[in-house]
Image: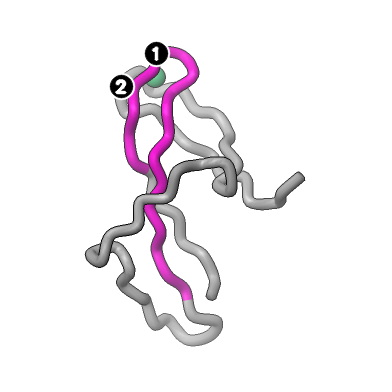
Amino acid sequence: MSDKLIEVKCTFCGRTWQEDIEQLERIDQELNKQIIFRGKPRRRREQYRVRCPHDGTFFIVEVEVEE
Ligand SMILES: [Zn+2]
C-alpha cells in the first residue's frame, strides 16, 4: 500500500477517482524537471499519464511532490 493517492478528474467525462501515483506511468521529460523553490521543503512537479476507467481517455495529471 502507498500513501501517494491522488484524486484525478477525467478531462473528457468529468468523473473523479483516486490513483496511486506509484502505479502510474511517469512522464519524464527535461521540460518537466523544473524545480519550484517555495521555501522548504523543496517541491517539484511531476507529470503522470492516467487512463479514465470509465471511457478509456488518456490524459496527463500534474502532481506536486516534496523532494
Ligand atoms: Zn472519463
Task: Determine the residue positioned at 34% across, 41% down.
Answer: 60
- Dot 2: element: loop
The rendered magenta stretch, by its main secondary structure, is classed as strand
Query: Does mark 2 have its CB less than 8 Å from ligand 1?
Result: yes
Residue at the image position 39 percent from the left and 40 percent from the top: 49
Question: Dividing the image into four equal quarters, which quarter contains ligand 1?
Answer: top left
Q: Amino acid at mark 2?
A: Phe
Q: Which mark is residue 21?
A: none
Which percent across, then down, holds residue 67? 53, 75
Front label number (1 vs 2): 1
Q: Quick check: is 52 in the magenta stretch? A: yes
Q: Which residue is mark 2?
A: 12
Q: Decide: marks 1, 2 in contact (CB < 8 A)?
A: yes
Q: Is mark 1 within 8 Å of ligand 1?
A: yes
Relative height, residue 66 to residue 7 (above, below): below
Indicate which disc, 1 or 2, sits on the residue closer to the N terminus: 2
Q: Is residue 44 magenta?
A: yes
- Residue 21 point in image, percent of width and height: 55, 47
Please report the residue visible at 39 percent of the width from the left and 17 percent of the height from the top.
Answer: 56
